[in-house]
Amino acid sequence: MSTEHGHDHHHPRPDSQVALRARALEALLAEKGLVAADAIDAVVDLYERDVGPQNGAKVVARAWTDPAFRGRLLADGAKAIAELGLGGVEADNLVAVANTPTVHNVVVCTLCSCYPWPVLGLPPTWYKSPPYRARMVAEPRAVLREFGLELPDEVEIRVWDSSAEVRYLVVPMRPAGAEGLAEEALRVLVTRDCMIGTAVPQVGSP
Amino acid sequence: MSAGAGPRLAEVDAALAGRAALPRDNGALVFEEPWQGRALGMGVVVLERTGASWAEFRRHLVAAIRRRPPEPGESAASAYYAAWLDALEALLTERGLLP
């Protein structure tokens, strides 16, 4: 694993003195009426789920409804998502790639698990799995079929390999049947997998 | 706590940016052990209950991080949240809420 990705695989102290200390402090604060366990739970829960694919869905729905935005998004992903208040270090070099009737895009990180988290949240477990990382490059059509996505032979599959430098967001095609929907309603059609490229939006199945 | 659960994570990130930034791995917060998440949660709740500012907490946290570099073999997240507990205790002591 390359250090440029910032991973480290050290371990917490074997001795869990510090865990006991945390628990003692929490007990003390509870006794003083300063914190309640469920308030802490609520914060932890909220923070763990804070970033999510709804950010990416907002970007895609905007691209579907605003052709000028779509143009800016495809020209400079990072700059365009900043218009929506999104971004951050790990989306500094976001590249948006658009599906068309003849091209389907899918994203992988063959080296580890680079992922455009400011727009997609946390990567799913399978995204980090060695089989996905290896096989999506070698046999994308077969892997997509396993995801339940059957693409016609004439559709070219482009596999984008993420890295610390470049992260990709797939802009799926607006599905048939979604013509009349407003931006808000469109957002729910755009799932995480649609923006990784292992699914396509379906009307009626969010 | 009432509706919501304290400030949004983005606000905490902004308040702690730089030397006191929360440990992350590919964007996700790193909690290697549950106590680390509890420590973060405690900090958020305590600041909200006491009215202490994130700037004030950050000052304690930066000082604690400086005093407590990771020990050999200790993970960055473990060292960070140990410093976090130091900072929280320092803040509470300063405000007379801990002996």
Image (cartoon, coloured by chain):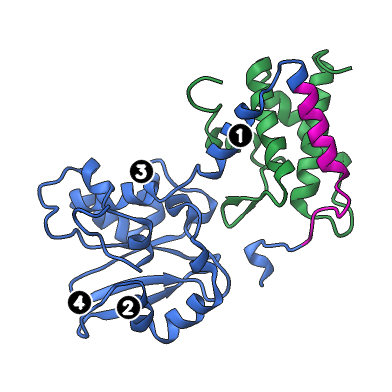
**Mark 4 highlights which residue?**
A102
Mark 4 element type: loop
Question: In percent of the image, x 50 and y 81: which residue is there?
Answer: A134
Label 4 CA crowd tier, 10 Å (few <14, some 14–19, many 20+):
few
Looking at the colours in the rendered structure, which chain would you say is drawn in blue?
A
- In the image: residue A118, left or right of residue A143: right
Q: Which chain letter goes with mark 3?
A: A
Q: Is residue B63 visible?
A: no
Q: How crowded is mark 1: few (under 14 residues within 10 Å), some or many (20 or more)?
A: some
Q: Distance between the residues labelled 3 and 2?
A: 35 Å
Q: Which residue in the protein does label 3 denote?
A: A83
Q: Which chain is green?
A: B
Question: What amino acid is labelled 1 in the image?
Answer: Asp
Marks 1 & 4 on one chain: yes
Q: In this view, does A39 lie to the left or right of A105?
A: right
Which part of the image, by quadrant, shows the N terminus of chain B? top right
Amino acid at the residue labelled 4: Thr
> Is residue A11 on the magenta stretch?
yes
Disc 4 versus disc 3: distance between alpha carbons?
29 Å
Tell which subunit mark 2 falls on.
A
